[in-house]
Image (tube, rainbow, N blue to C red):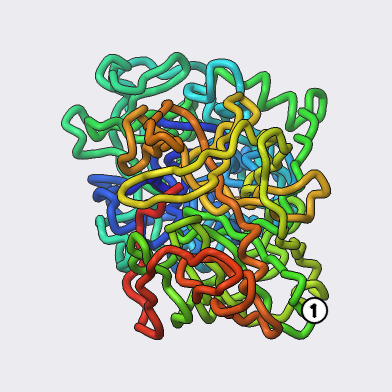
């Protein structure tokens, strides 16, 4: 089934909210992803012996880098209240906005160490030169300015007067990883590292090179910047002083690194810093209530039986559970869980962070759903300003409008059809929702578990779970439709959601699951004389959680 996150991609490597596909170094999203990273850092560098007043560390609190010191990207001071970095570093705001107001972002400048010394300033605005949504994308324009709430005393660095020629000596620096074990804190240096190298002919970085980029590093790749050095500088000497010619965008497979040529964009930089040409902030979509599950999405839902004092329930896909997925024909029931659940405010930053303490139910047969019990009640979450959605008891029908509520925005979809059966990788779901294909409804890996909302914006009528990647039939990542006559159809690009109306009939007071409750038809339900029995099921009770699944469906 469609993957919720691609193995080995880092936080700044692919901006899925913008459809990015080109790898480049940056902050990682999860420890599970980190484990697959190659060895990266200021390759061939040494520890700096003195501080550079203009050099700084970007340290966002959300999404938080997976390292103890909080370092995510490099920055350079251009003016007392302005720093320069890579566009993809600022692009890790929750909705992928081009310009806006962040929350919990800071920089530490003028220190050798990411944890002490120098000056610390809060970032109160960001402006990206380009995004993947712009015509031509952002390669060669991977650059951003951040405004500081208070001025720093650090001496700024100048922008180089011209694009450096091939073989020009440059100095690179940063706090990137020094080894490939993302779970090892020793791989994250707190001390600044630097190396001297040269600008290579752009033809030596052929795989990604675009107009406006510099190829920097030794010919054999032994000296280069890479993961978590993003935004760091390529410095040249002008008039006996350092000047910034480029900022790290991403590594080439050869080991050399691509830098955005800063000298090409001085008009844009000067227009913003001077206040004469300041871009307007993006209109931020309302994403309140989306829970970030690290490769999947969830939402807090209540049923007609729910009371304010009941522990809140979180809805996501069955394939998004931690540990092994439910087997075909099986359901996981009442299992221990330990899962952090940040729940978004309107702009996508955490309104609060709850914890899932129990996996109440999960299945991928008949439908694709999971319910977690949280450590806070509905009343407590509402008091903290969390959006609580309502579970529908009515099935989705062809023609119904749907809003897919994912963590970075909203997709406007329509139920084109309700298909008899959907098969994928050995699983079958029934009465699945096929979306009408269009640019306004094009889900991707990582949107699994997104609530499908009714026009009221509060009622969850379905849940997104998969799409067909390659046009294959019934394989993982390639769901197929099976008609009443057994006809099998698969169309590349088609997306699907699952019905959720049957869940409410299985819930009772106290956020308890009762599979013998009258009207409950979920997989594993006890047969009743007044309704058809659910498929045979293997029920798993209180087994301990297994290692986190790093490739959920999506």
Residue name at image x 53 percent, y 25 percent: 138
271 lies above or below 196? above
Q: Residue furthest front?
A: 529
Q: Secondary structure at mark 1?
A: helix
Q: Is residue 245 left or right of residue 214?
A: right
The mark total stands at 1
244 lies above or below 464? above
Q: Is residue 219 left or right of residue 306?
A: left
203 lies above or below 214? above
Nearer to the camera, 398 or 191: 398
Residue name at image x 55 percent, y 76 percent: 356
Circle 1 sits on which residue? Answer: 379
Residue name at image x 44 percent, y 43 percent: 422
Where, by quadrant of the figure, is residue 518 drawn?
bottom right
Residue 2: x and y, percent? Answer: 40, 43
Please rate how many residues cluster around mark 1, counting C-alpha atoms within 10 Å: few if below 14, some from 14 to 19, many from 20.
some
Nearer to the camera, 463 or 304: 304
Can residue 540 be seen by looking at this rendering?
Answer: yes
Nearer to the camera, 187 or 417: 417
Can residue 82 be seen by looking at this rendering?
Answer: no
Q: Is residue 408 left or right of residue 489?
A: right
Nearer to the camera, 208 or 230: 208
Residue 272: x and y, percent? Answer: 74, 29
Where, by quadrant of the figure, is residue 235 drawn?
top left
Residue 439: x and y, percent? Answer: 61, 25
Residue 23: x and y, percent? Answer: 38, 35
262 lies above or below 250? above
Residue name at image x 60 percent, y 34 percent: 417
């Amino acid at each position: 089934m469609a993957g919720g996150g691609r193995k080995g991609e880092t936080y700044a490597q692919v901006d899925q909210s913008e459809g990015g596909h080109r790898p480049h170094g940056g902050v990682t999203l999860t420890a599970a992803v980190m484990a697959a990273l190659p060895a990266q850092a200021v390759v061939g560098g040494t520890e700096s012996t003195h501080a550079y007043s203009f050099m700084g560390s970007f340290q966002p609190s959300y999404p938080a880098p997976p390292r103890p010191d909080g370092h995510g990207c490099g920055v350079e001071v251009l003016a007392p209240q302005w720093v320069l970095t890579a566009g993809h570093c600022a692009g890790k705001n929750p909705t992928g906005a081009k310009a806006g107001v962040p929350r919990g972002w800071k920089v530490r400048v003028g220190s050798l160490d990411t944890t002490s010394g120098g000056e610390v300033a809060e970032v109160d605005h960001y402006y990206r030169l380009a995004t993947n949504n712009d015509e031509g994308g952002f390669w060669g324009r991977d650059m951003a300015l951040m405004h500081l709430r208070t001025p720093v005393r650090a001496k700024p660095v100048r922008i180089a007067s011209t694009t450096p020629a091939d073989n020009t000596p440059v100095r690179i620096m940063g706090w990137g990883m020094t080894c490939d074990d993302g779970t090892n804190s020793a791989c994250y240096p707190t001390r600044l590292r630097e190396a001297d190298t040269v600008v290579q002919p752009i033809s030596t970085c052929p795989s990604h090179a675009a107009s406006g980029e510099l190829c920097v590093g030794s010919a054999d790749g032994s000296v280069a910047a890479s993961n978590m050095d993003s935004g760091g500088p390529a410095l040249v000497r002008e008039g006996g002083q350092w000047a910034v010619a480029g900022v790290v965008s991403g590594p080439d497979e050869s080991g050399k690194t691509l830098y955005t040529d800063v000298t090409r964009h001085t008009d844009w930089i000067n227009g913003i810093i001077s206040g004469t040409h300041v871009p307007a902030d993006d209109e931020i979509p309302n994403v309140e209530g989306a829970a970030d599950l690290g490769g999947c999405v969830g939402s807090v839902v209540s049923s007609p039986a729910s009371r304010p004092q009941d522990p809140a329930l979180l809805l996501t896909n069955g394939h998004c559970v931690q540990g092994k997925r439910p087997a075909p024909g099986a359901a996981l029931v009442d299992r221990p869980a330990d899962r952090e659940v940040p729940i978004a405010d309107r702009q996508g930053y955490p309104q609060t962070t709850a914890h899932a303490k129990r996996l109440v139910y999960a299945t991928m047969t008949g439908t694709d759903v999971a319910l977690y019990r949280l450590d806070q009640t509905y009343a407590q979450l509402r008091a903290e300003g969390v959006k609580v959605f309502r579970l529908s008891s009515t099935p989705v029908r062809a023609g119904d409008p749907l809003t897919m509520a994912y963590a970075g925005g909203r997709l406007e979809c329509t139920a084109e059809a309700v298909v008899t059966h959907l098969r994928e990788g050995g699983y079958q779901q029934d009465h699945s929702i096929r979306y009408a294909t269009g640019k306004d409804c094009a889900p991707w890996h990582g949107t699994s578990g997104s609530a499908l909302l009714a026009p009221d914006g509060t009622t969850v009528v379905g849940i997104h779970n998969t799409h067909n990647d390659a046009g294959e039939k019934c394989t993982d990542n390639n769901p197929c439709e099976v008609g009443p006559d057994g006809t099998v159809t698969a169309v590349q690009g088609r997306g699907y959601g699952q019905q959720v109306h049957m869940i409410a009939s299985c819930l009772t007071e106290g956020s308890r699951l009762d599979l013998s409750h009258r009207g409950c038809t979920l997989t594993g339900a006890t047969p009743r004389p007044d309704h058809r029995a659910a498929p045979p099921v293997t029920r798993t009770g209180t087994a301990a959680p297994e290692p986190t699944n790093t490739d959920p469906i999506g």
